[in-house]
Image: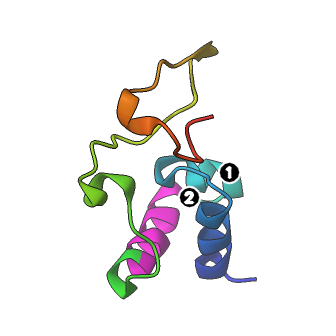
Amino acid sequence: MSVLIDVLDAVKRGVPGERVGAYLGVDPGLADAALDHWVRLGIVTQSGDLQLGCTGCSGLNGGERVEHAPSCAGCPFSR
């Protein structure tokens, strides 16, 4: 597969945009460029662009669980 398709598949699986490069084992700049491509096409929307109070979630921070904001309630990514 191409990096473009791999990046799209990764974000569909819930991999945060800033971690896609590491997840796929590719250069982070290349992963960012592919992600920007999908954002420009309107296929992917970054959580910060939704303006719903979502700052994105990391799930874990240095091995410790992160306390999620009330605005995360019901979000499938805030497990």
Report the side of 39 relative to 64 (left or right): left
| Residue 70: quadrant of the picture | top left
Q: For mark 2, what is the residue?
A: 27
Magenta stretch?
Answer: 27-38
Q: Amino acid at mark 1?
A: Tyr
Image quarter in which the C terminus is found = top right
How much space separates mark 1 and mark 2, taking CA atoms?
A: 10 Å
Rendered location of residue 66, percent (x, y): 51, 19
Please give the name of the residue rendered at 33% of the width and 40% of the height, measured from the top-left corner: 55
Rendered location of residue 67, percent (x, y): 48, 18
Mark 2, Cα crowd under 10 Å, few <14 / some 14-19 / many 20+, is: few
- Residue 25 visible in image: no
Rendered location of residue 61, percent (x, y): 53, 20
Q: Give the camera-side residue of 25 and 54.
A: 54
Please identify the dominant SS of the magenta region.
helix
Q: Which mark is residue 43?
A: none
- Residue 28 visible in image: yes
Image quarter in which the N terminus is found = bottom right
Q: Amino acid at mark 2?
A: Asp
Q: For mark 1, what is the residue?
A: 23
Q: Secondary structure at mark 1?
A: helix
